[in-house]
Amino acid sequence: MTAPKQKQMHLAAHFPGVNNTTVWTDPRSKSQIDFSSFEHLARTAERGRFDFFFLAEGLRLREHKGRIHDLDVVGRPESLTVLSALAAVTDRLGLAATVNATFNEPYELARRLATLDHLSDGRAAWNVVTSSDAFTGENFRRGGYLDRAHLPQALGSARTGGTPYTRAAEFVATARELWDTWTPDGTPRPFRHQGQHFTIEGEFTVPRSPQGHPVVIQAGDSPEGREFAASAADVIFTRHGTLEAGRTFYTDVKARLAKYGRQPDDLKIMPGVTFVLGDSDAEAQESAAEIRRQQISPQNAILALEQVWGRDLSSYDPDGPLPEIDPDPDSGLVQGRVRIGDPSPSSRLRSTGGGPIAVAARWRALSEAKGLSIRQTVIETTGRQSFIGSPETVAAELVEFVAADAADGFILVPHLTPGGLDDFVDRVVPLLQERGAFRSEYTGSTLRSHLGLAEPVWKG
Ligand SMILES: Cc1cc2nc3c(=O)[nH]c(=O)nc-3n(C[C@H](O)[C@H](O)[C@H](O)COP(=O)(O)O)c2cc1C
């Protein structure tokens, strides 16, 4: 009898952008927008034989009390342009751009993705996001389009009769129709798409790309988001990065595939996770605690609190107790999607169990039970890293997660730009390779082949 084959994990590198996990005060921290920073992380990921490099997206600088959010003052370059430049300095690494399906149009985006797929010889991926708040929408021609706060009535009556996800699903289907218009032997054919959200026709300008269809990633956690992923995505980027939550999510999503005629392996589940390494587990725990203190400075603690409470709490002492007043979810104090502890007023909260009042109640209960100050509570609820330990410990835990079907792999979010992945690649990847849990060499040239995804059948 032969031993069952070890499940291979997939790894991706998240460029540490404007997350609250990025430590800016560290002297090793470098520019967020210089090409050299993107290049460093991408080359490191490729040296580690990672599946792909990943860029998140924000379409409007977030605001806090009428001022640009501290985390956003460094700016947010446009992803596909950055990835096109990275295609020239990497050979095998997949290149994934987050691009919003609410505010873009299929023809234009399908062209840009197919172009990246050509430029990179088959390494392009699109993370389809659906953020749709009016604040972000003001940047666009339709201003305020698909405002979630008014769903579904406003949409049903006035606009398209859909939701951000019906639009995203039709968007992806339309992009795939466009990618299929050229025959594999290079003949362009006209297209015509008539649907709820898009009615377009003409000819697509870009020949069929090396992957046929660039890889589609989905990030969004509601039941509608999961269903969309099950029907149309190749990869899910999820926040469920603990063993238990990961297993529950994994089981839920994989079970949704059969009704679309898909196999469990057709959709890879990759939680975004953070890590801290040390020579020993104890040393790693110490650095992790220090990193949390750097991430959640006294000012950041009050900022996080204000994001949950929607109130000006600048008079509160970060080392004192939590406010007794309740949050004001409709104050408009915070504009744009904020990721600290999921307290944003957007729908992201639904998945974590309730709005600001529920989050505040959980934070209060924790603070009372453990006697924590405001800053300690914020550190406890938002700053805990996913994997902490020696390279051996972290490698063993990653393998355990994948073996336990809590994930098919990980999107690693380092806390330093741009060198935050160096140690992982030098110290953890070789251990994963020794265990046979991760590739030692790329075996194919396209991102689809790294992910073990079939070539899409051409639908002529
Ligand atoms: C792990 C994760 C990462 C996300 N990254 C982005 C992003 O980079 N840019 C963005 O505009 N929205 C991002 N989103 C937001 C989703 O696209 C979606 O709009 C939001 O989660 C609401 O959908 P839901 O109710 O299905 O979760 C992300 C969501 C998740 C869960």
Image (spheres, rainbow, N blue to C red):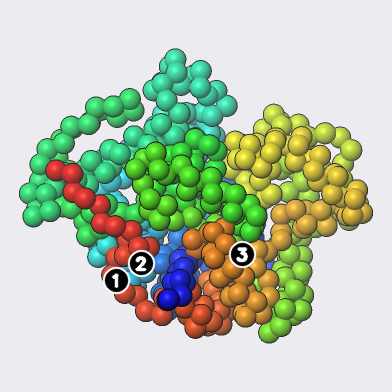
Q: Residue at x 39, y 23 (%)?
A: 160
Distance Cα–Cα, label 3 vs label 2: 22 Å
Mark 2 or 1, nearer chain start: 1
Mark 3 or 2, nearer chain start: 3
Residue at mark 3: 274
Residue at mark 1: 444
- Answer yes or no: disc 1 within 8 Å of ligand 1: no
Distance Cα–Cα, label 3 vs label 1: 28 Å
Q: Residue at x 52, y 24 (%)?
A: 151
Q: Quadrant of residue 310?
A: top right
Mark 3 or 1, nearer chain start: 3
Residue 115 lies left or right of residue 171; in this view the side is: left
Query: Of discs 3 and 1, which sits in the foreground?
Result: 1
Residue at mark 2: 450
Residue 182 lies left or right of residue 426; in this view the side is: left
Q: Quadrant of residue 108?
A: top left
Query: Label 2 neighbourhood size at 10 Å, few (<14), some (14-19), many (20+)?
Result: many
Asked if disc 3 and disc 2 are in contact, CB closer than 8 Å, the reply is no
Residue 282 lies left or right of residue 241; in this view the side is: right
* SS state under label 1: loop
Query: Label 1 neighbourhood size at 10 Å, few (<14), some (14-19), many (20+)?
Result: few
Asked if disc 2 and disc 1 are in contact, CB closer than 8 Å, the reply is yes
* SS state under label 2: helix
Q: Residue at x 42, y 25 (%)?
A: 162
- Amino acid type shown at disc 3: Thr
- Identify which residue, 117 or 39, lies in the foreground: 117
Q: Position of residue 306 (x, y in %)?
A: 75, 43
Distance Cα–Cα, label 2 vs label 1: 6 Å
Q: Position of residue 58 (x, y in %)?
A: 50, 48
- Amino acid type shown at disc 1: Gly
User: Looking at the image, which residue sits at the far front?
Assistant: 1
Say above or below: 328 vs 65. above
